[in-house]
Image (spheres, rainbow, N blue to C red):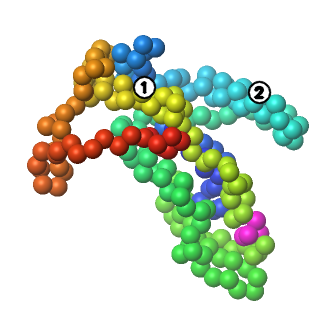
Amino acid sequence: MVGVLHSWKRDLNYHPHVHYLVPAGGLSEDGKTWFPVKNDFLVPVKPLSILFRAKFRDALAKTDLFALVPDETWTQHWVVHCQSVGNGMAALKYLAPYIFRVAISNNRILKLEDGQVTYRYTASDTGKTFYCTVAAEQFIHRFLQHVLPKGFIKVRYYGFFSSGNRHRLQLARKLLNICNSSRSANVDETKPAISSQDLHCPKCGRVMEMIQTLKPKRYQPP
């Protein structure tokens, strides 16, 4: 599982939330069987929302920040949205910009006049363009609230995506290459799941040749 922190709405207001990209299945404890989800269904959303709220509350209760949170926060409904995103490539492309860019780019800032900043943004629900004019101090505040503290990790990896479980990630890849659409499959770890003869260049169509295997570095993304 990959988690990406996102703290802003398109109008620059503070809206902290986390996007998680979760595999549609899981490995057995011995790492020899892959169990896929059924009919693109992973977990029920309503119980997941309650569980996430409780876990968040328990973790925050161990810090000094817990006293600053209004009591009604823990009784109102929390929303955990969960849906199938196919092979995940579209979701990764959507999340990638949040990792490397700041909350607003220069081309969205239209003018600075009389101590006022005007910038544009696009509503995510309608696709319409809106314009917002605020005092320069307020604009700076909106921008800086999305600057993370030094050393803060914006992307987290869990399960077989974590750095300590790369061997299980390789097993999952082998199983998925072998079983394709099967509900479950067994794999012999001593045999390669895919050969260079199975890979073709997307440009010229020729068979690709294995030159070198790059070992993942510690603490680097998978």
Q: Residue at x 57, y 40 (%)?
A: 156
Amino acid type, mark 1: Arg
* C-beta proximity under 8 Å, tags 2 and 1: no
Provide residue 214's location: percent of width, then percent of height.
35, 43
Q: Which mark is residue 141?
A: none
Amino acid type, mark 2: Asp
- Above or below, comparing residue 108 to residue 209 in the picture: below
Q: Nearer the viewer, mark 2 or mark 1?
A: 1
Left or right: 138 in relation to 8: right
Left or right: 62 in relation to 142: right
Residue hosting label 2: 58
Provide residue 187's location: percent of width, then percent of height.
29, 17
Q: CA distance from mark 2 to mark 1?
A: 30 Å
Q: Is residue 26 visible?
A: yes
Helix, strand or loop at label 1? It is: helix
Left or right: 151 in relation to 219: right
Provide residue 208's location: percent of width, then percent of height.
16, 45
Image: magenta residue range: 138-142
Provide residue 221's location: percent of width, then percent of height.
48, 43
Q: Residue at x 19, y 33 (%)?
A: 195
Dominant secondary structure of the residues highlighted in magenta in the image: helix
Confirm whether the magenta stretch covers residue 8: no
- Above or below, comparing residue 21 to residue 139 in the picture: above
**Camera-side residue of 78 and 2:** 2
Q: Is residue 3 visible?
A: no
- Above or below, comparing residue 170 to residue 108 in the picture: above
Q: Residue at x 28, y 17 (%)?
A: 188
The quadrant of the image that shows the C terminus is top left
Confirm whether the magenta stretch covers residue 139: yes
Residue hosting label 1: 168
Task: Tell me the crowding category of disc 1: few under 14, some 14 to 19, or many 20 or more residues within 10 angstroms, Cα based.
Answer: some
